[in-house]
Structure formats: structure tokens, C-alpha cells
Image (cartoon, rainbow, N blue to C red):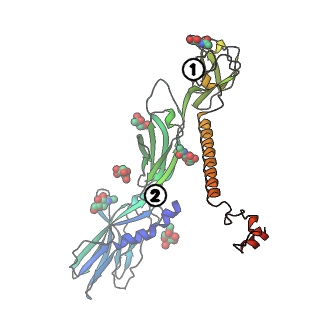
Amino acid sequence: MTRAASTAWPPLLSLLSLCWTSTVAETETIVVQAPPHVRGFLGDNATLQCKLHTQEKNVQVTLVTWMRQDLAGRPRSVAVFHPIRGPSFPSHPSFPEPGRLEFVAARPGVELRDATLAVRGLRAEDEANYTCHFATFPHGSRSASTWLHVLVQPQNKADNLEVPLSLLSQEPVPVALCISTGGRPPANISWSLDGKANTSQVPGPLPGTFTVTSFLILTPSSQINLKNVTCIVKHESFEEPILLPVTLRVHYPPEVSISGYDDNWYLGQSEATLSCDVRSNPEPTDYEWSTTTGSLPSSAVPKGNQLQICPVDELINTTFTCSVTNAVGTGRAELPILLREGPSREQSHPALSPALVALIVVVVLIAVLSVVVIYRRCFRQSRQRPSSPSANGKVSYSVVNGNASSPQELPTAGTR
Ligand SMILES: *[C@@H]1O[C@H](CO)[C@@H](O)[C@H](O)[C@H]1NC(C)=O
Ligand SMILES: *[C@@H]1O[C@H](CO)[C@@H](O)[C@H](O)[C@H]1NC(C)=O
Ligand SMILES: *[C@@H]1O[C@H](CO)[C@@H](O)[C@H](O)[C@H]1NC(C)=O
Ligand SMILES: *[C@@H]1O[C@H](CO)[C@@H](O)[C@H](O)[C@H]1NC(C)=O
Ligand SMILES: *[C@@H]1O[C@H](CO)[C@@H](O)[C@H](O)[C@H]1NC(C)=O
Ligand SMILES: *[C@@H]1O[C@H](CO)[C@@H](O)[C@H](O)[C@H]1NC(C)=O
């Protein structure tokens, strides 16, 4: 992604340089043009384009000067080109060592029209407004300005923060973290999920860079456990925002319910099973079955999250509890069982579920209907044409014996 974004820049830079600005009106016969913005990456080379355009033949450029505005806005010259003597670079605090600035188009003794300046090995402090001045004869001075931006692509990562769910406080806490390291300008971080974000910015590893840290702040609950959120990082150096998915993880005590009772247990039923259903993070470590009156009846045997009951006796007419423990805490559910005296009549075939009954009814209906339809069709046919030869397989031997009313029927009969 980094590479794709970097290689996408040169076309963009050249596009920007097509968008010239000039400090003088179009009607002037002599114009200096420079792009308003130039972007370059830290350590790379940037090219500050600046050209004088004129239709007139006898315009003489007597000197080109590049000025750099300091933070207070005061211009100081950093590069000068004399048409005969060539380039010179006045000492400047930002360019103390020679060689970082170069006139890439101007040549001594050649008509001076192109003042384009290269800045090698960009530094954060090179970011400034640069103005190129053409001193001309007989028209006087003309200039144009360019704002040089120095960019650094940030490194981005996102992660979830393990959150213990405190039963006492339902305060929002940081649940995920997104860091964009060493960007210039600072990256812009947002989250796909509504919620508060606490974003802060500190200096990055390289001078002039910034590290932005954003915490996603939510009220922890079992509902946000395993929820996917996306950290969205926007930066001037990215064509598209970078999307970093994070799966939230929240620790919470077991949420327990008991299933397996259909409200139709009776005395003497041979067996029954209750299940303790749990949602928790982390996984449960312990299940404990009990009753509200104390210990389990002897006919109820716990097997992990199941309670196997065999047989169903009077002692089962009670309220069962299931307590589940994980690393965070314990959750508990109760289920009252109300036994019937005996199997209710309509429930004497508990294996027949309503869906199965419906299916059987439908199958029987279809069978009956098919029989009726087939019977009626056969009946009608035999009544209409008692010895119809057109019906396949109904060629009667009477044809062979008879007065040959239809001769074609003979071979048909013979092939069979
Ligand atoms: C910057 O320019 C210098 C001199 O032309 C060249 O040697 C160097 O490779 C360039 N650096 C980059 C990153 O293009
Ligand atoms: C460059 O100039 C523009 C206006 O001309 C100003 O808004 C901007 O802050 C300047 N940039 C720097 C880096 O001084
Ligand atoms: C970051 O994004 C927000 C919301 O889109 C916007 O208001 C803000 O100006 C952006 N900041 C920067 C530095 O791009
Ligand atoms: C954001 O973070 C700062 C520093 O860590 C902290 O002082 C502040 O309370 C946090 N804000 C929120 C809303 O959590
Ligand atoms: C969350 O993302 C992971 C992979 O990043 C995926 O396997 C999982 O199905 C996603 N969960 C949801 C609820 O979308
Ligand atoms: C189960 O207990 C309830 C009262 O809690 C009672 O009405 C019911 O008759 C009992 N059933 C059996 C089979 O003892």
C-alpha cells in the first residue's frame, strides 16, 4: 500500500505543476508562473518550477532570486542566478551545507527563462513558501510563489484492548487502540463505530513528524464482544483511507439459561435431561447443578453442562439451578419443574412432533387424491372405448382374430 501510494505521486505532482499561478494579470506581456503547491516526501527531492513567459523578443532577465519565507513571514534569499556568472547560494540557516539546492534548467550565457529549483534530501523544516523573482529589463520585477509541503507517510496499526467487565461500574472504557506513527502532517484517525474516541498527538520518531493515538471508548458489554470495528486512517499521502479491522474482545461473566424442560414432565417418566446454556468470555471453567432447597435429588446426575434425570420421581418436583463460573465471575439460572401426575393423553406419543403429524397428514391426503384421480381416469377410459387400440399396451387379440378393420395393428402386435 505504501509503495502504491508513493508511485502514485509523480503524476499528481506533475498535475499540480500544470496548475500554474501568476502574480500578474493575463493581459500582461510578461508573466512569471509557478505551481501554488508542491508536495515532496521527507528525504526525497522536490522540484520548484518557475518560468518566465513573454511574447516579446527584447526582454532581458538581469537576475533570478529565490526567496524563502521564514516562520515570521520574512523573505530571505536562498538561491540566485546571474545570466553570466551563473548560480550562487547565499548562506541560509536552512541550507547551511552546499548542494541541496540546484538550478536544474538555467545555464550561464543562455537566455534566462526557466528558474526551476531542485531541493535535494527534503527535511521537515524545508516546508515554507518560496518565491522566485525575475528582475527584467525594461519591465522591472516579476515573481510567483510556491508552498512546499514535506510529507511523511505514517505507519498504522490497530488492536483491541482486553477489557474486564466490571459488574459494579458500567463506565465507558477504551476497547480498541489505533496508532498512526510518524506521519507528516499528522494523520486523521476515525472509527467505523459510533462511540467516543480519545485521540492524542505526540512528536513522531523523525523530526517534524507526528504520532497520533486514538482509543475507541465504549461501555463494555457481552454484546460488543467479537464485534468488528474499523479504524480509518486518512493522510495526505494516501490515495484512499487505510482501513484497519479490529475484533473487539470483552471479558464478561457467564450469561446462563436452562433448557430441556417442555412443561410436560410426569411422575414415572423414564428419563429427562436439562441443559445449562452459557454465553461467556472466556470459556466457562465450572458448572454446578443444584436445587433451591439444597442438594440434588439422587435421580438427577450432573454431567458437565447437562443434568440427566432417571427416573422422574417426586423429588424432581423442585426448582433446579445451574451456576457457571469463568475467570471473570459466576452466572446462575433457575428453572422450576412442575410435575404432572401422569402422561397426558394427547402426549402419549411424544415422538410425534407437530411437524411430523402435519407431514403424515399431507402424505395420506396426496395418496388418497392420487388413488381417486387414477381410478376415475381408468373408469372413464374403459367406459368410452372398451377395446381402444390407441392406448399403449392395450392391443387386443380380438384384432388378430377379427375382420382386420385396421391392418397396421398387425405388425404392431407382432413386434411385441
Ligand atoms: C535526488 O537527486 C540526486 C541528484 O540528482 C540523485 O542522486 C538522487 O538519487 C535523488 N534522490 C531521489 C530520492 O530521487
Ligand atoms: C504560505 O503562504 C500562504 C498564503 O500565501 C499561507 O497561508 C501559508 O501559511 C504559508 N505557508 C507557510 C509554510 O508559511
Ligand atoms: C479529520 O477529519 C475530520 C472529520 O472528517 C475533519 O473535520 C478534520 O478537519 C480532519 N482533520 C485533518 C487534519 O484532516
Ligand atoms: C483521554 O485521554 C487522556 C489522557 O490519557 C485522559 O486524561 C482523558 O480523560 C481521556 N478522555 C476520555 C474521554 O477518556
Ligand atoms: C469479523 O472479522 C473476522 C475477520 O477479520 C471475520 O472472520 C468475522 O466473521 C467477522 N465477524 C463478524 C461478526 O462480521
Ligand atoms: C408438584 O408440586 C406442586 C406444588 O409445588 C403440586 O401442586 C403438584 O401436585 C406436585 N406434583 C406432583 C406430581 O407431586
**Residue at the extreme front of the image, as rendered:** 403
Q: Is residue 143 above or below residue 253?
A: below
Residue tagged by mark 1?
335
- Left-right relation of 120 to 37: right
Front residue of 340 and 202: 340
Closer-to-camera residue (26/320) = 320
Question: Is residue 74 visible to us here?
Answer: no
Identify the image quadrant of residue 390: bottom right
Amino acid bearing label 2:
Val
Q: Quadrant of residue 240?
A: bottom left
Q: Position of residue 158 (x, y in %)?
A: 51, 46
Residue type indicated by callout 1:
Leu
- Looking at the picture, does residue 367 appear above or below residue 128? above
**Residue 159, position in %: x, y?**
53, 43
In terms of secondary structure, where does tag 2 sit?
Answer: loop
Looking at the rendered structure, the secondary structure element under dot 1 is strand
Residue nearest the observer in this picture, 246 or 183: 246
Between 325 and 23, the residue placed more toward the observer is 325
The quadrant in which the C terminus is found is bottom right
Query: Of label 2 and label 1, which has the lower sequence position?
Result: 2
Q: Is residue 352 left or right of residue 66?
A: right
The crowding category of the residue bearing disc 1, from other C-alpha atoms within 10 Å (few below 14, some 14 to 19, many at least 20), is some
Q: Do tag 2 and tag 1 residues touch (Cβ < 8 Å)? A: no
Q: Quadrant of residue 327?
A: top right
Which of discs 2 and 1 lies nearer the camera? The answer is 1
State the CA–CA distance, disc 2 to disc 1.
63 Å
* 65 lies left or right of 14: left
Give the mark count: 2
Residue 380 appears in the rendering: yes
Which percent across, then down, holds residue 53?
Answer: 29, 80
Which residue is identified by label 2?
152
